[in-house]
Image (spheres, helix red, strand yellow):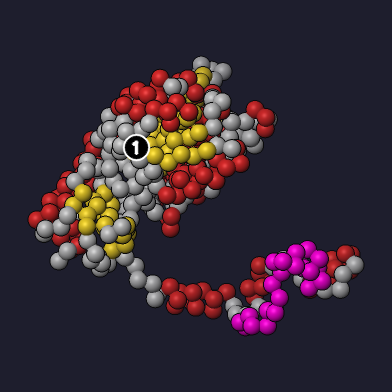
């Protein structure tokens, strides 16, 4: 038996034999045959490779990984290159005092972590213009699904309107959560006029800002109609774009959700990344997850505590508003510290630089005679091209190339794209 097997498989051969005897079985194969259904049981495993040590396996995996071609990713759709400030990386992301601590149920003893989450909630309320925010959710897709369920719980209707250009992974989560509840998702092109009868029959409408093609549309008419027909208005908004936009709460949206990945969180091979969830005061009792609140202790000093917990693992299941049992406290705290590190003006500088580089690239492509979609947007350029960009991962859709710029973009990088 190799060192790896001894280290990772607990029972010794004598212990295995004793357990099999107690079960009245002759071998592990017989145990497996009784447990695993025939339809999924793997048979004929004679072709398996010879076992090796842990070190040998790591060396082989490293050798295979060296064949990967690493490219700069400009696909966007909720995943962007970011700069993690070294002070946050070293003192939070790589600090076990932060990354090993799951929020305790008696959280009053953890004032430092609660203060960081309280700051995160404050950041979200200031960004979105909505008065109540929770202490993060898993990711943008599940936050959008929770928003759909909140809207559905407040209505007897079963139709949910979704922006046709919502990010595909978000739409997939919405469809998965909607199906067992009998919710019918109706995809609409929200850049065109939405039929009034659709809004009248729906309990909620969800829009992506900017959308999957990078466009920022005007929704004033849609929001007014939704208000008349008591159709809840949900915005899935990019927080870095929100820095320069009018807050979605002031536009008239009831709920704002999104991913905080752009605020100094590494891509992490696709996530997860902390999501935010903010609502109007009317729906604060239905918000999923947890809310950190400020109170006063027995000595009259300010103290932080978990003011609201609506997850099923914390309260009675029939009273729970959410079955999500995972937040992203570490990543939420990192994004909150990122905002504090840069400050309001620093965040505006980063957002304006992304917008400026987008305009620069659009102008350069137009000078080259390339047909560019000049719709209003923030970070994504869509243009007619069949050329493959060497060294970059980008999107190709229906004869168009889509490039999404981010905090890592430089003028030199823009120059290199078509040299």
On screen, residue 383 above or below 64: above
Q: Secondary structure at mark 1?
A: loop
Measuring from the top left, give residue 379's x and y in whole percent: 26, 47
180 displayed left or right of 188:
right
- In depth, the one of 164 and 10 nearer the eye is 164
Is residue 249 highlighted in magenta? no
- In depth, the one of 41 and 80 nearer the eye is 41
- Taking the view exactly as shown, the residue that stands out farthest to the left is 367
- In depth, the one of 51 and 269 nearer the eye is 269
Measuring from the top left, give residue 212's x and y in whole percent: 34, 47
Question: Residue at the location (25% across, 43% down)?
Answer: 378
Mark 1, Cα crowd under 10 Å, few <14 / some 14-19 / many 20+, is some
Q: Quadrant of residue 409?
A: bottom left
Magenta residues, start to end? 29-50
Q: Quadrant of residue 412?
A: bottom left
Question: Residue at the location (45% across, 49% down)?
Answer: 169
- In depth, the one of 358 and 10 nearer the eye is 358
Is residue 45 highlighted in magenta? yes
Measuring from the top left, give residue 74's x and y in whole percent: 30, 56
Tell me if I can see residue 77 in this picture: yes
| Quadrant of the rendering where the C terminus is positioned | bottom left
Q: Quadrant of residue 339?
A: top left
Task: Determine which residue is flagged by label 1.
Answer: 190
Question: Residue at the location (36% across, 45% down)?
Answer: 165
How many marks are shown on the rendered structure? 1
On screen, residue 296 above or below 87: above
On screen, residue 294 above or below 413: above
230 displayed left or right of 18:
left
Tell me if I can see residue 110 in this picture: no
């Amino acid at each position: 038996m190799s060192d790896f097997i001894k280290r990772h498989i607990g029972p010794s051969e004598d212990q295995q034999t004793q357990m099999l005897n107690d079960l009245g079985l002759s071998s592990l194969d017989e145990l497996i045959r009784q447990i695993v259904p025939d339809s999924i049981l793997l048979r004929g495993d004679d072709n398996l490779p010879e076992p090796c040590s842990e070190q040998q396996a790591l060396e082989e995996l490293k050798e295979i990984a060296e064949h990967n071609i690493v490219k700069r990713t400009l696909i966007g759709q909720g995943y962007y290159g970011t700069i993690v400030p070294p002070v946050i990386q070293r003192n939070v992301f790589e600090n076990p005092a932060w990354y090993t601590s799951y929020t305790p149920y008696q959280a009053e003893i953890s004032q430092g972590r609660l203060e960081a989450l309280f700051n995160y909630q404050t950041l979200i309320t200031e960004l979105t213009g909505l008065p109540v925010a929770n202490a993060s959710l898993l990711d943008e897709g599940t936050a959008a699904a929770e928003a759909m369920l909140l809207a559905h719980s407040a209505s007897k209707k079963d139709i949910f309107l979704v922006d046709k250009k919502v990010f595909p992974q978000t739409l997939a989560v919405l469809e998965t959560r909607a199906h067992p509840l009998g919710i019918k998702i109706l995809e609409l092109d929200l850049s065109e006029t939405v039929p009034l009868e659709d809004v009248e029959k729906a309990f909620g409408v969800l829009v992506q800002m900017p959308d999957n093609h990078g466009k920022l549309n005007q929704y004033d008419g849609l929001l007014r109609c939704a208000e008349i027909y008591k159709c809840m208005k949900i915005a899935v908004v990019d927080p870095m774009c929100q820095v320069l936009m009018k807050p979605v709460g002031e536009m008239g949206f009831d709920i704002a959700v999104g991913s905080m990945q752009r605020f100094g969180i590494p891509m992490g091979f696709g996530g997860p990344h902390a999501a935010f969830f903010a609502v109007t005061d009317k729906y604060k009792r239905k918000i999923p997850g947890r809310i950190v609140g400020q109170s006063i202790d027995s000595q009259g000093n300010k103290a932080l505590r978990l003011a609201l917990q609506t997850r099923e693992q914390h309260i009675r299941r029939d009273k729970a508003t959410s079955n999500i049992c995972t937040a992203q406290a570490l990543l939420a705290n990192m994004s909150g510290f990122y905002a504090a590190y840069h400050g309001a003006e620093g965040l505006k500088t980063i957002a304006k630089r992304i917008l400026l580089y987008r305009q620069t690239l659009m102008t350069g492509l137009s000078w080259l005679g390339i047909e560019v979609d000049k719709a209003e947007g923030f970070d994504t350029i869509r243009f007619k091209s069949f050329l493959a960009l060497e060294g970059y991962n980008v999107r190709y859709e229906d004869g168009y190339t889509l490039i999404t710029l981010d905090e890592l973009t430089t003028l030199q990088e823009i120059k290199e794209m078509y040299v």
